[in-house]
Amino acid sequence: MKIRFAFDGREFTATLEDNRSARDFASMLPLDLKIDDYSTNEKIAYLPRKLTTDGSGRFGNEAPGDLCYYAPWGNLAFFHAGYRYSSGLIRLGRLDGGTQPLLTRGVFPLRASHLLTNERN
């Protein structure tokens, strides 16, 4: 499943993993959130409720462009630089087309919605 994110006049898409947490996230869409910088390698957005963590576990191949959920805090994590797996992190999907939109620093309203099948990236 593909979803669309929009903030600060930028739009980008992500392809979700086939796991329970990603499906739970998709069931909440559309969402209006706030995206903000966290550390030097990610942007975060807090969800209105926690996602299921059933079936989650350690993953490898961490890379910029990963869309994750950090269960202890209940937030999305959009990684735009390298990172390492940590306990409580669940990969929800991967950004399509790179991380360039995430390099804009600051706090912005964020819209997350389903990408209709007849729409293009």
Image (tube, grey):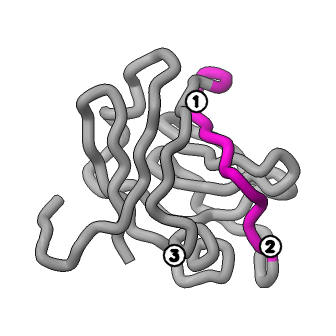
Amino acid under disc 3: Glu
Per the image, label 2 sits on a secondary structure element best described as loop
Looking at the image, is 19 positioned above or below residue 47?
Answer: below
Q: Residue at x 63, y 75 (%)?
A: 24
Residue 53: image tag: 2
| Quarter where residue 52 is shown | bottom right
Estimate the x, y position of residue 39 in percent, counting from the top left.
67, 22
> For residue 59: magenta?
no
Judge depth for marks 1 and 3 and give the one in front. Answer: 3
- Give the side of residue 10 with respect to residue 70, left or right: left
Residue denoted by label 1: 41
> For residue 43: magenta?
yes
Estimate the x, y position of residue 84 in percent, counting from the top left.
71, 46
Residue 17: image tag: 3
Estimate the x, y position of residue 10 in percent, counting from the top left.
26, 35
Amino acid under disc 2: Thr
- Give the side of residue 75 with respect to residue 43, left or right: right
- The mark that comes first in sequence, 2 or 1, is 1
| Marks 2 and 3, how far apart at CA | 14 Å
Amino acid under disc 1: Asn
Per the image, label 1 sits on a secondary structure element best described as loop
Per the image, label 3 sits on a secondary structure element best described as loop
| Quarter where residue 2 is shown | bottom left
Judge depth for marks 2 and 1 and give the one in front. Answer: 2
* Front position in the image: 99 or 14: 14
Q: Which residues make up the magenta segment?
A: 38-53
Looking at the image, is 90 positioned above or below residue 57?
Answer: above
